[in-house]
């Protein structure tokens, strides 16, 4: 899937109000007002520019062959919320651990 903010932001708008889960299993929803994404578990918003930066980081990691195995890999404000949402929407995928099994 494309990682262009002009494509991803409308996709995020379509899925606002749905329940997602952090890597620790905490449920959350979000709403979008203007260029800001508001998570119900936080008092501050995640701006569209932060999401764009996260998408750029994801592209760079993928180009370097580095798997995005958790929010810390994205390394931006709100990553603990962006990671599960972007993963669920298919913006990136995590490696299938069964592919890393060595057969003797």
Image (cartoon, grey):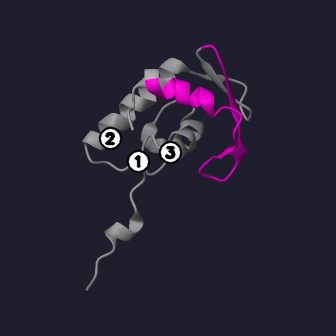
What residue is drawn where x is 70% and y is 49%?
A: 26
In x, y percent, where is residue 104? 25, 86
Left/right placement of residue 42 relative to residue 85 reads: right
Residue pictured at 42% horizontal, 53% vertical? 94
Query: Residue 96 occupies which quadrant of the picture?
Result: bottom left
Would you identify the image quadrant in which residue 12 lies?
Answer: top right
Nearer the camera: disc 3 or disc 1:
3
Q: Quadrant of residue 29?
A: top right
Distance between mark 2 and mark 1 Cα atoms: 7 Å
Q: Residue at x 55, y 36 (%)?
A: 82
Q: Examine the rendering and report whether any part of residue 84 can be seen.
A: yes
Helix, strand or loop at label 3? It is helix
6 in relation to 82, above or below: above
Residue mark closest to the camera, 2 vs 3:
3
Q: Give the x, y percent position of residue 91.
A: 45, 40
Q: Magenta span has 11? A: yes
Residue 31 placement (x, y as % from top left): 69, 27
Of 79 and 14, which appears nearest the observer? 14
Quadrant showing the N terminus = top left
Q: For the magenta stretch, what is the residue range?
A: 7-34
Numbered badge on residue 87: 3
Helix, strand or loop at mark 1 = loop
In the rendered image, which residue does mark 1 sit on?
Answer: 68
Q: Is residue 68 left or right of residue 11?
A: left
Residue under pointer 2: 61
């Amino acid at each position: 899937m494309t990682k262009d903010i002009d494509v991803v932001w409308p996709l995020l708008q379509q899925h606002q109000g749905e329940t997602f889960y952090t890597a620790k299993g905490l449920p959350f929803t979000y709403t979008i007002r203007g260029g800001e994404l508001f998570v119900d578990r936080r008092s501050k918003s995640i701006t569209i520019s932060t999401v764009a930066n996260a998408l750029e980081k994801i592209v760079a990691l993928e180009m370097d062959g580095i798997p995005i195995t958790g929010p810390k890999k994205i390394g931006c404000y709100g990553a603990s919320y962006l990671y599960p949402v972007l993963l669920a929407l298919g913006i990136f995928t995590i490696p299938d651990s069964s592919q890393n099994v060595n057969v003797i």
